[in-house]
Image (cartoon, grey):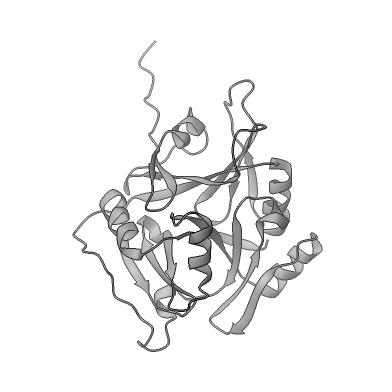
Amino acid sequence: MSAHELDHVAFAVPGWRMAGEMLHRELGARFAGGFSLPAFNPCQVALAEDMRLELLEPGSSSTSFIARFLAENAGNAAPHHITFKVRDISAAIAGAQGAGIEPILVNTDHPLWQEAFLHPRDTGLGFLTQMVQTSEALENLADANELTADRPWAEGHCTPARLPVVFGQVADLQRAEHVLVNVLGADRHGLPGLPAGEPAAAVFRWSDGADLILQELAAGAGNPGLKALGITAGDEPWAGPDSPGLLETLGAGSFYPELGIRISPLRLPVPAGPG
């Protein structure tokens, strides 16, 4: 198996503050750490069970790729990539190549953070995919304290929400399944209870982290990509993909422009009363 964890979802944002304030207010997310680089400034917020969301703002360089990404999206925040942790980056790269996908932006120079990306045009997933071999959290990677950046929003006491599901749509579910199962080592599960005529969907699961649920787009129904974060209260169990009306629930969440994605509360089904 290549990946063992869907570790975090990263968002390109004009600045950390607005997105961080919203995530703390709405999800109880806590600032985990961040630092500044010429190309981009990454920070992460932690949810329950240490699931992470990452905020990427433009760095100091005039050629910042995050600034360019935002400009291509009319300056609006948007999902940027999903990160999977792998135990052996060399094996993960070889596995992708064996499946006909040439990784990009490969960087294995740093002993604590070795990475490679898979381009959406090569995977058909509709989003950039990062594979990382690391034993460190982002907040431990800054060189001494020179690169460390402070949290730019206030935080109070709160209980973080859980993020059990990330939801996206793809043009070709079979192609996406090939990449997720054969390259990224996911276990695939069916999504029961789909209404007749509903486009196909499936659940992809790793040993740790969130599940990824993908649905095939109907012809002319929109653009592929990440569409929603499915959340529960931090102490609330989730019924799993068998939960009735799950796709409708994921699609009915509120859209948050601070991230460019929906946040959808996942409700447990109400037990039927006695017959």
Image x and y of residue 210, in percent: 49, 52
For the C terminus, the image quarter is top left
Q: Nearer the viewer, residue 75 or 103?
A: 75
The residue positioned farthest toward the top in the image shown: 275
The residue shown at (35%, 16%) is 273
Image x and y of residue 226, in percent: 53, 48
Q: Nearer the viewer, residue 236 or 212?
A: 212
Figure check: 182 above or below 227? below
Kindly tell me whether residue 8 is visible in this rendering.
no
Figure check: 33 above or below 111? above
Image x and y of residue 100, in percent: 80, 60
Kindly tell me whether residue 152 is visible in this rendering.
yes
Which image quarter: residue 137? bottom left
Image x and y of residue 12, in percent: 46, 61
In the displayed structure image, the side of residue 23 where residue 122 appears, left or right:
right
For the N terminus, the image quarter is bottom right
Q: Nearer the viewer, residue 175 or 205?
A: 175
The residue shown at (58%, 70%) is 132
Which image quarter: residue 28? bottom left
